[in-house]
Amino acid sequence: MNIIEIKGLKKDYPLGNTVVKALRGIDIAVEEGEFMSIVGPSGSGKTTLLNVIGCIDFATEGSVKVGDREITVLNDRQITDIRLNKIGFIFQTFNLIPVLNVIENVEFPLLLMKNQSRTEIRRRADRLIGEVGLTEFAEHRPAELSGGQRQRVAIARALVTNPDIVLADEPTANLDSVTGAAILELMKEMNRIEKTTFVFSTHDANVLKYARRIVKIKDGLLSDN
Amino acid sequence: MMLLVRLSLRNLFRQKRRNVLLGSAMALGIMILIVANSFSHGISDIIFNKIMPYVAGHVAVRFNEKGGVMAEIFRDKARALAAVANEPLIERTDESVGFFMRAIGNGKADNIILVGADTTRGVSKKELKELEESFKMVDGTWKDLETTAVENAAILSTDKARYLNVKKGDVLRIRFRNMFGQDQAARLNVVGIVKNSNIFMQSVVFVEQRRAKDLLGYRSYETASLNLRIKNPQKNSRIIADRIHSRLKPGLAYIQGTVSNKNKEQTVVVFGYKSDDDSKEKFSKKLKITDGTLENALKKNGVVLCRPLARALGAAAGDEISLRYDRKFEPEPARFACKVSAVCEPTEGLGENVVVMNDDKFYNVYYESLPKNDDATPPAYLPKEGDAWYALLSPEWILLKRTANTDEYTKKYKEMGKKKRKSTLIDVSTMYETASDILKLEGVLNLITLSAVLVLFFIILLGVVNTLRMTIRERTREIGTIRAIGMQKNDVRNMFVLETFFLTVFSAAAGVVGGFAVMGLLKQMTFNMSDNPFGMLLVDSHLHFVPTVLGVLGNVLLIVLVAVLTAYFPARRAANLSPANALRHYE
């Protein structure tokens, strides 16, 4: 079953007096539980594609279905709810909330959902922090962690809501090769344990060996699938 | 909500230096506002709680016989007291006995105000504290006023004692014209010296009230104006004043007595007629003169008899008749003689055994010896309210209309001063009317302070907006992250608004604490202003601040509200940022 279905996706950005055509007609479908990589050089449209799939940016044209919902027709509140409930994000620069410690960062999406008790939230966050191997750093603030540790926190935060899809935009770009490999192993492991669909972008050829499916993008168009 | 509160508080402490500086400015503004408001409220407190209640009471029932400013006398004390009796809200009723006079000390003379102090009644702890705040005994005690060992024991202020060159044990001679126009002289024995920082109280010489009344010529059944102290005066003064006012509505003044002429006697009722031009014109239209002249009847000493009465007495115009009647407070009957000015036909609504005389003459007789009328069986022909005669005959007194503020009060007395009054005037007023200008002054002071502080706050709020804009700019990627994770726009907006709210609340708390500390320090300072009118704004030579819970909370709420409103718009702009754009933002 397809968890993501994109047809004829175009995305234009105004840049001064000109319009940048970031995506120029993308058709793609992602099946549930896939571990898929979007590969392409810088400026090829990887991040834009992930942003549109992740409902943090809007398509100029085309159809985008996440789960069974067409997201291009939803309002901001509905879109935000989809982001919260269906999607997890892992950013290249980790994007942890600096004033919250590890466990609070992981709990954050669950607290926004407002449908679980404090005990349940804490139990779920503790389990995920354990799974990413950061139990002893639970009370640390992001500034007190290494890059790899921060990205582990970001992975735990992305998975804590049991999302259908986790989108990772160049998750290893700010990490050394060893740490990056470990993070990808962890994501793969999580994909196996949690059965969550992972879509991640990269321009690093070394990372590709971890992907089960590779989609190549160039100049806003898919060049190989 | 707890998540937002936690995030806001933590973010607030993230930029410590910036927020501490901004918070300090806010705290300073609130501190100034609280100190200034407490000071202006303190002025009102001094005027309304420490001066006016002692000078004029919360409610004053003022009597002025024949409209005379100095003639503060009402001839029927029991009746006056009945008007203020059975009022649980009245804590205390005092006679206001005070009189200007000349005092001669040891080689020096000066004007003083003789004030009667009622030492026979106990004072509450609160009253004693207030008394001691205003008057500190330097020599002697208040109890010494009661001594009978010396004639007219008196206590005066240190300044007056110094000026008159007298000390405890010395004698002061006083000269004055009493309220009946008689020149009087007496001796006061100084039994105490009191220190007072209020320049207006330095001329006051206290004498025990009964003795003061004796000196001024009051009889035991007569009273001076009444000063009333009311429970919760701000709320109840007007209510009590209105109620007393309605109880003091006058009836017609009349004397039931016997008129005799040449061994003939008749029981009569004597009325006064109003002698203002308008009333006299109406009065003359009602009279059908059969003997004497209308001109004489309208003169100051005009006396008019009805023809049947004149016939029964065998009296004609120009004859001297004598009137005798029982007095209300004296055992001996009152007697006086008068000349008949005119005889008239009986008129409808007035009866036949009636003597009508010019109020100028009538009130002289009436007030000097109030008649013992048989109130249970009033004359059958006593005009009722609404009758044509009722409006023309003299009332027991004139009750001045109630007023709402100082302007109306002043206007009322100005109008009163234009007319020559024959009867007693009674005025019921609250201190909030007689001194409403003080309340206005407090309002103006508060407004000036608020305006100054609002300017300060405008500058501070520019700081709030700027700080918030800087904060939002610095945290744009963070906004993008939390929006991407799934925080709704409203929550993002509320998070920033809450940050400003907490900053303002903490600053306000610091400002309140600072304000109280500053007031505490200023209160410690002593100002010697005994020869300066501004000294009255001090309590025991110290500045007086009265912060109120409502005032402090009001100021804090105002500032918090303004700050939150100011923060709302930048916060909303932050919430409306597109998550993708916010995530792309780099400083």
Image (spheres, grey):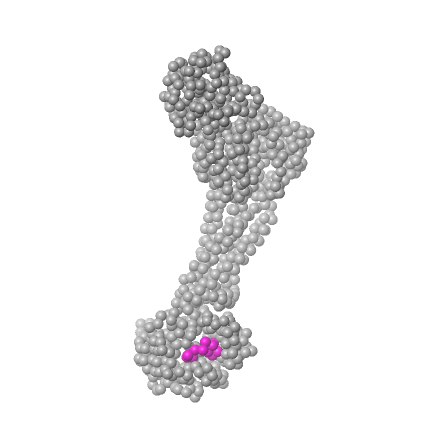
Q: Quadrant of the C terminus of chain B?
A: bottom left
Q: Residue at x 59, y 36 (%)?
A: B202
Q: Position of residue A78 (x, y in %)?
A: 38, 71
Q: Residue at x 35, y 86 (%)?
A: A225
Residue in front for this viewpoint, B418 or B128: B128
Quick check: can you spot residue B421? no
Q: Position of residue B346 (x, y in %)?
A: 39, 18
Height in image: B393 above or below B121? above
Residue in front for this viewpoint, B97 or A86: A86
Residue in front for this viewpoint, A222 or B454: A222
Height in image: B253 above or below A197? above
Q: How many numbered discs sit on the rendered protein? A: 0
Q: Residue furthest bottom?
A: A209
Residue in front for this viewpoint, B264 or B29: B264
Q: Position of residue A148 (x, y in %)?
A: 50, 80
Range of residues picked out in magenta:
A155-166
Q: Is residue A157 magenta?
A: yes
Q: Position of residue B148 (x, y in %)?
A: 67, 29
Q: Residue at x 65, y 38 (%)?
A: B138
Q: Residue at x 46, y 80 (%)?
A: A174
Quick check: can you spot residue B174? yes
Height in image: B111 above or below A206? above
Q: Is residue B161 magenta?
A: no
